[in-house]
Every structure is written in structure tokens, then in C-alpha cells.
Amino acid sequence: MRELLCELLRLFYDKGWVSGTGGGICALEAPGRLLLAPTGVHKERVTPDDLFVVDASSGAILEVPGDASLRPSECGEIFRAIIARRGAGSVVHSHALAAVLACDLTPDDALVIEGLEMLKGIPGMSNTDRHLMPVIANTPREPELTSEVSRVLDDPRFAGAQAIGVRDHGAYLWGEDIWEAKKHTEVYHFLFEALIARRKAR
Ligand SMILES: [Zn+2]
């Protein structure tokens, strides 16, 4: 699991989704034990020894990395809110430009995605469905997003969403395990890029 998280950070870095030390990732390695990447580091260089283990319920740090200069990801509280409310096993935080530009396409708190085969990559969706992804406003500090994240997770309009867009910032994406989180991260980034390209073409 540790190796896999680092591999995904490298893959996502190569796509420009966690560049400039931004973004993050976590996954449950056992019930209640959350592996969490450090903050403010070059994400493509994170090693298995650099990960924190935190209590998925309380957020208490259970194990620290060997490198004492590392600090746990600022997304920890948001990750835990998504895990608690959606039963997610893994959450990705993206700083992709496509996520930022996709949020610009809606003036309110819901991004409509429709008319794309890739929608089938979201559980329960078909290519004829109209998918609503929540979009929230950015805040000066990442943990301050938690209350808005919790609000949209509780909003029945977004019951089928596996991602939350954050204006001028990026997105949180999740799945029931690390493989599903990877899949949803790829699916939504394709959808973001498709919406932007289509809007441009009009
Ligand atoms: Zn961020």
C-alpha cells in the first residue's frame, strides 16, 4: 500500500495533477489506520518511509516518518470527512489546471456533466445520465474547506458524486479503495478536460 501510494503520486505528478508540491493522497491500510502523505514536499519524490499513519476517526498521529522534518498533509481533516461520510478507502487531492478551469464553467455550486461515455466510470452512471459534481469556494487555509466539504457531502443532489471541485484550487476525488480512487481521479480529470475543450470549441 505504501509503495502504491508513492507510485500514484508519481503518476499524477507526470500528469500535472500534483505539481509544485501541491495535492495529496491517503488510503486506509487497515480499518481505522490511514496512510497520509506529507505536506509541502515534491510529491514525485515521496517514499514509503515518508508516510504518516493517522487515526481515521480522531486524526491523531499514530506513526511518524523517519524524517522528523516532515509534516502531515494539510488535507487530513478533509480526507477524514470524506472517509467518514462516504465510506471511502482512499482520497486524492488534485491541483490540476483542468480541475480549476472546470469549476469556472459553473456560476453556482454544481457542475453539470453529461453526454460523455466516460460517465460510465462513475458508479451508477450511464452515458445518458446528467451528473452533478459539487463545487465549493476556496479558503485561505486548506483545513478551512472542511465545513463546506461536509455540507456538499450531505447534500442529496450530490449523492452520486465521487469528487468535489474547489474553485481556483483543484479537486478532491475518492473511491472505496485505492484502485477505485485512482479510477475516479482519471475519470473526472478526463471529464474536466472534455468540458473545457467543448466550451472552447463553441
Ligand atoms: Zn490543495
Image (tube, rainbow, N blue to C red):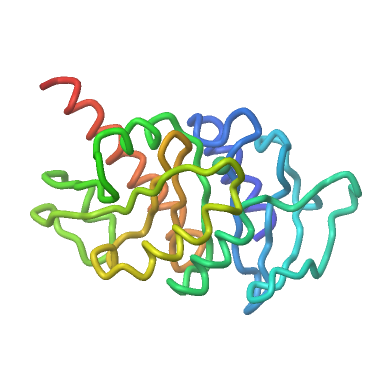
Residue at the extreme top of the image, as rendered: 201
Between residues 5 and 113, which one lies in front from this camera angle? 113
- As drawn, is 94 to the left or to the right of 189? right
Quarter that holds the C terminus:
top left
**Residue 167, how many percent across, how many down?**
41, 39
Between residues 155 and 98, which one lies in front from this camera angle? 155
**Residue 197, how many percent across, how many down?**
23, 26
Q: Is residue 170 above or below residue 150?
A: above
**Residue 173, how many percent across, how many down?**
44, 53
Name the residue rendered at 50%, 42% in the picture: 94
Name the residue rendered at 66%, 47% in the picture: 6
Residue at the extreme bottom of the image, as rendered: 31
Between residues 66 and 1, which one lies in front from this camera angle? 66
Name the residue rendered at 90%, 52% in the picture: 66
Name the residue rendered at 27%, 41% in the picture: 191
Q: Is residue 109 above or below residue 124?
A: above
User: In the rendered image, which quarter is residue 52 located in?
Assistant: bottom right
Quarter that holds the N terminus:
bottom right
Q: Quadrant of ligand 1?
A: top right
**Residue 84, how many percent across, how many down?**
51, 74
